[in-house]
Image (spheres, grey):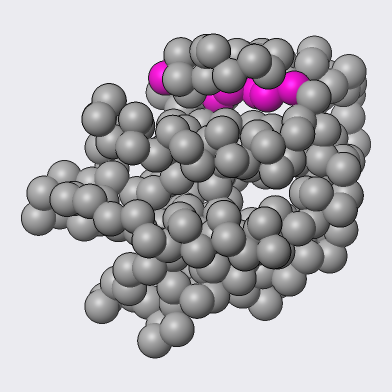
Amino acid sequence: MRVNRFVSELAAFSGEAIFNPYRDRCDVYDRADAPAIRRANLRHMLSAAIEGGASTLWVARDLGYRGGRRTGLALTDEAHLEDARLMMGGARFRRATRGPAMAERTATVMWETLLRIKEPVMLWNVFPFHPHEADEPMSNRSHTRRERDRAQPFLYDLLDLITPQKVIAVGRDAAAAMEGFGVPVEPVRHPSYGGQTEFICQVETLYGLSPLAQAAPPARSHALL
């Protein structure tokens, strides 16, 4: 019931130049029932994180138009829905869009690393919606301070739902936004703009993973549900 209420409250959020994947439908790419599919994806992710005892929460800045805007899942594009299912113990995630599956560069780096951890990890954004430039829905912009303040209660509720032992903040913006929540925060470099190698090394250190050059490549599957 708490998960359903959380998702319903997310779906009620609206704002100018903001796409809410849990209530809004893209006329170009989305299926007719896309918002409902994305709400179900998030419910499955949350339930799997709670039932699987996910002890770590990864938090980035906001949803991107190639990733979470389409899937309803933070840091997850359509090319990695199957990987998300594997990490979260078989949770069922579906595509909400028509046409070819879209991949996002940041999500690709994230999931190559997440699959090496071999434990459930809850993924989230400080601003859990897709902010875009006015009249340019397929663009990304950083959310404003006012928008973050409006969405902050969702982060408090999520922390209460998941009760993580540690938060990994991906990027400086996420790290700054996570100050004052009373949860240990480990900042890591965002993998974009030349930060991929540093990001991977930092995550390897946090999780005690062998350096990538010594680790066997993870089995990959991109079958989509």
In-front residue for pair 164/207: 164
Q: Quadrant of residue 33?
A: bottom left
Q: Is residue 143 above or below residue 92?
A: above
Q: Which residues are magenta?
A: 166-173
Taking the magenta stretch, the answer to whether it contains residue 18 is no
Residue 112 in percent (x, y) is at 70, 41
Residue at 37% across / 77% down in the picture? 30
Please name the predominant secondary structure of the magenta segment in the image.
strand
Q: Is residue 37 left or right of residue 61?
A: right
Question: In the image as oriented, which residue stretches furthest toward the bottom?
Answer: 32
> Do we see residue 194 in this rendering?
no
Would residue 24 appear left or right of 15 to someone viewing this image? Answer: right
* Residue at (11% x, 49% y) in the render: 134
Residue pictured at 45% horizontal, 20% vertical: 177
Give the left or right position of residue 210, taking residue 19 as reference: right
Q: Residue at x 45, y 45 (%)?
A: 128
- Residue 17 appearing in the image: yes
Q: Quadrant of the C terminus?
A: bottom right
